[in-house]
Amino acid sequence: MVTAVAQRLASQRKEIDDTLAAFALSPTQLQEVKAKMRVELERGLKKDSHPTASVKMLPTYVYRTPDGTERGKYLALDLGGTNFRVLVVKIRTGMRNSVRMYNKIYAIPLEIMQGTGEELFDHIVQCISDFLDYMGMKNTRLPLGFTFSFPCNQTDLVCWTKGFKATECEGYDVVDMLREAIKRRNEFDLDIVAIVNDTVGTMMTCAYEDPKCQIGLIAGTGSNVCYMEEMKNIEFVEGDEGQMCVNTEWGGFGANDNIEDIRTRYDREVDGGSLNPGKQRFEKMTSGMYLGEIVRRILIDLTKHGLLFRGRITERLKTKGIFETKFLSQIESDRLALLQVRSILQHLGLDSTCDDSIIVKEVCGAVSRRAAQLCGAGMAAVVDKIRENRGLDNLEITVGVDGTLYKLHPHFSTILKDTVRELAPNCKVDFILSEDGSGKGAALITAVIDKYLYAMRFSDETLRDIMARFRREMENGLGRDTNPTATVKMLPTFVRSIPDGSEKGDFIALDLGGSNFRILRVKVSHEKKQTVQMESQIYETPEDIIHGSGSRLFDHVAECLGDFMEKQKIKDKKLPIGFTFSFPCAHTKLDEAVLLTWTKRFKASGVEGMDVVKLLNKAIKKRGDYDADIMAVVNDTVGTMMTCGFDDQRCEVGIIIGTGTNACYMEELRHIDLVEGDEGRMCINTEWGAFGDDGTLEDIRTEFDREIDRGSPNPGKQLFEKMVSGMYMGELVRLILVKMAKEGLLFEGRITPELLTKGKIETKHVSAIEKSKEGLTKAEEILTRLGVEPSEDDCIAVQHVCAIVSFRSANLIAATLGAILTRLKDNKNTPRLRTTVGIDGSLYKMHPQYARRLHKTVRRLVPESDVRFLLSESGSGKGAAMVTAWASRLADQTRQIHRNFMLSSHSYP
Ligand code: BG6
Ligand code: BG6
Ligand code: GLC
Ligand code: GLC
C-alpha cells in the first residue's frame, strides 16, 4: 500500500519534472541562444539581411546620450507599457537632481487599445488635454517627447505588439496620427519633437545619472533592448562616423524558427492564442504579458493529469489572463509562507491544497527562471558585440533597466545578471534601475534636440516684461527730452486721421521698400458709394541699384515712374503722387521726409539725412519728360493702416511683418512733444524694428541673433527686426541647423557647402516647412536641395526648429503690439479697448500658422481688448492714395485761400 502510494507520488513527481524539464536550459543551450542572438543582431544590421531579419535593429537617430547641458520644460507621453502616462518634465542645469516631473496615469480601455487608430489617438489627445488643464498649461506650447513602446521604422509603426491592436495604424506615421488628432481637437498646440522607444527612453533616463549607460533593457509587459551601435556597422543608414542607438526589437527573435528547439508546446499554445500569432516569439517566452499565461497553461495540463487542484479544471483556471506577472512575482517570493501562496491562489479562485501551492510555485519558478536566463543570454550577445565593436578585451558598461517583471519579481534580476556574467565573462555589466520611467529619457532626448532652441521660447511673464519695456521705449520716443537718445524713434507722420469716405480723385502711388517695388494708379470715385479702382505694376530693383549711389536709385525710380505713366498714357498729366517709402523718415510736413537711416537691404549712398521728395523731384526734373507732384510720403505701416481704415473706420494701428517689421498707431497730439498742438491725434511711426539697439533685449538675444547681426548690412541696428522679420528668419533657421548638424544632432552630422551658404534657407521655405499637411515633404525637398539626405526624424526636427523661430517672432510682435494696444486703451481711458489693427507683410500673409499664433498671444497678453486683425489685401498703395487725396484737398484749400486773399487784396488797394 505504502509502496503503491510512494510509486504514485514518484510517478506524479516525474510527470511534473518532465513537464518542467523543458523549461530548464542547460549552459550549452544558453550559449547557443547567445550565439544565435548574436547572428540575428548582425543580420539585422546588414543591408541585405535586414529586411528579413527577425531582430529588426531599428535605427533611432539618437546619436548620443545626455551630456548634462540639457534644459527646458517638456511634455512627455509614455504609451505602451503597463501604464499610459502624461508627464511634464522640467530640466534645469547646474544642479544635481535637477529634473522635476509631474505625471498622471490614464487608463486606456481595452476597446480603445483594440479599436480604430483614430479612436486611440483621440483618446490620447483627450488625456493630454485633461493633463494640460490640470497643470494649467493649455496656453503653453510645449515640445513633446513621445515614448511609444512599439517597433517603429523612424516614425512609422511597423506592427503592434503586446496588448495593442488598433486598426489602421500599422504602416502609418505615428507623429502624423497624433498631430491630426491634436488638430481635430483644436484646443492646444504641441511641437512633437521626438518619438522614442521605451528602451531608448530608459537608456537616456539612466545615462543622465551614469554616463557609462549605453544599453536600455525593458523586462516588463514586453521585452526589448536598445544599445549604442557604431554607425559604420549600421549598413542601411548613411554615414560612418560616431554612434547611433539601435532599437533591437529582440522580442521578434525566433521568427525564423531558429529557437524552435527550446520552445515548448506551452509557448506555441500561448502564441496561438495571442493577438499576433507567429510574431514576438522570444518576447512571448520572456516578458510579463505572457509568463503568467504560460504558467496557467502548464497548470491546466497538470490538472488534467490529476496532478493539481484534485484534477478539477475550474472556469477560473480556464480564464485567460488571470495569472498576471504581479501574482507570479508574489508567489515566488521567498518571504511568503506556503499558506500565503495558497491564499493568493484561492484569491485567484483556484481552490488549492498546500501541495498544490508547492507545485504552482515550482511551475512559476521554472517559467520565470527560463525568462531571466533567456534575457541574460540575449544581453550577453549584446555586450559581447559592443566589446568587439570597440576592440576591447574587457568591457565595462551599464545597462539601464525598467519594466514590472524586472522590478517586482524576486529572482528575475539576479538570474539575469548571473547568466550575463557566465555567458559574457569579459564584460563587467552593471544594471541600474530607471526609477523615473522612460518619460524622463524622452524629455531628455527632446532636450538634446532642443538645446539651442530653449532660449527662444518665452513664458507669458517674459512677454509681459518685454511689453513693459517697449511701453517705456515708446514713452522715451515721445518725450521732448528723452527723444534724442531714444532708440524707438516714434516719428510723427503728419497724418491726422484715417479715411472718412470723402476722398476722391486720380492718384499715383509709389511703393518702395518692401519685397517689391510697385507703382500704382488709384482712382477713387464717388458715385453713390466710394469705389476704388487700382492698376499696378511691379518693377525690379536690382541689388546694384539698392547698394549703389542715391542718385542712381532715384533715377531708377523716376525711370520706372516714366514707364508707368507712358503705359497709362498720363505722361502729360500731373497727377498727385503718394509715395510709400518704407524706411524711417523725419517729417515736418507730409511732403517732406528726411531719411534717418537705411534699414533692411537698402544701402544706397548719399540718401541718409536727405529729403527723399527733393531727391525724387530732382531725378524727375533731370529727365524732363513728365511732371510730378509728390503730395505725401508715408511709411508702409501708415499706408497699411490707411488702406485698412478705408474698410474699417476703427482701424488705428498699422503693422508690417514682412521683409522688415514696424508699426504705427494714432497717438493723442497732446502726448507728442515734438509737434505743436494739443487737439486731436496724429499717426506715429514707431520704427519698432530698432527696439533693443541700446541693449534692452540682450537677455533674450541668442548666439544666432548675434551672428545674423554681424553678417548684416547694418550691424548693431534694427536688433528687434532681426529677431522677427522675414529678411532674417530663414537665415536664423539655417544657422541653427548648421549648429545642430555640427553637434551631430541632425543629418548624422553631415554638413554640405550649400547648408553653409548664407541665404540658402529663405523665410518662404520656413513657411512651407511649417505647413501641417505637406510640411515634412517640403522639409525633405528643401533639405535635399541643400545636399543633405535627411531622415524623417531630421525633417521633424527641422520643422520643430522652424516652428520655434517663427513662434518666437509671433510672440515678440505680440508683446510690442500689446504695448501699443495698452497705450491706446490708456489714452482712451476705457476699461475695454475695441480696435482694429491693419496688417501687411509677406511673413504674416504666407506663413501657415503665424497669424493664428499672433492673434492668440495678443489676446492673452491684452485680455481687456477686442482686437480685429484686418489683412491689407491691396497693399499700402491704396492707403498712400488716401493720404494723398487728403493732402491734395488741403493743398487745394490752401490755394483757394491764397487766391481769395490775393483777390481781396486786389480789391482793397
Ligand atoms: C515604464 C516606462 O517605467 O516601464 C515605460 O516608463 C515602459 O516606458 C515600462 O514601457 C515597461 O514596463 P511595463 O512593465 O510597464 O511594460
Ligand atoms: C506690401 C505693401 O503689401 O507689403 C508694402 O504694399 C509693404 O508697402 C510690404 O512694404 C511689406 O511686406 P514685404 O513682405 O513685402 O516686406
Ligand atoms: C515590445 C515592443 C517594443 C518595446 C517592448 C517593451 O517588445 O515591440 O518596442 O520596447 O515591448 O515595452
Ligand atoms: C523697416 C523700416 C520701416 C518699415 C519696415 C517694414 O523696419 O525701417 O520703416 O516700416 O521695415 O517694411
Image: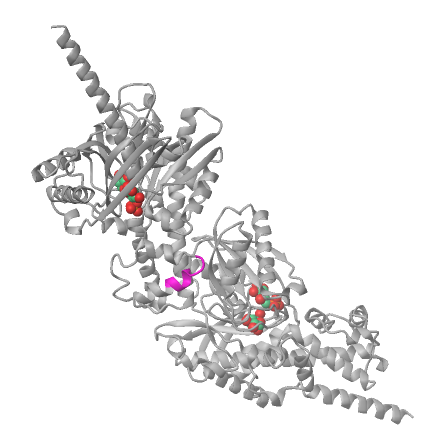
Instruction: Kindly identify the residue that appears in the image at 53 percent across and 47 percent down.
Output: 137
Dividing the picture into quadrants, the one containing residue 757 is: bottom left
Is 480 situated above or below 704?
A: above
Task: Give 873 or 243, whichever is nearer the viewer.
Answer: 873
Dividing the picture into quadrants, the one containing residue 681 is: top left
Magenta-drawn stretch contains 776: yes
Query: Is residue 62 something one can see in this rendering?
Result: yes
Task: Give 610 or 223, whichever is nearer the viewer.
Answer: 610
- The kind of secondary structure the magenta stretch mainly shows is helix
- Judge from the rendering whether residue 344 lies leftward or rightward of residue 578; answer left or right: right
Instruction: Kindly identify the residue that appears in the image at 40 percent across and 25 percent down.
Output: 827
From the top left corner, tell me how far across and down residue 653 is, in percent.
Answer: 36, 34
- Image region (quadrant) for ligand 4: top left
Task: Give 455 or 143, whichever is nearer the viewer.
Answer: 143
Q: Which residues are magenta?
A: 772-779
Viewport quadrant of the N terminus: bottom right
Instruction: Kindly identify the residue that appears in the image at 57 percent across and 54 percent down.
Output: 128
- Judge from the rendering whether residue 708 lies leftward or rightward of residue 288; answer left or right: left
From the top left corner, tell me how far across and down residue 712 is, in percent.
Answer: 23, 49
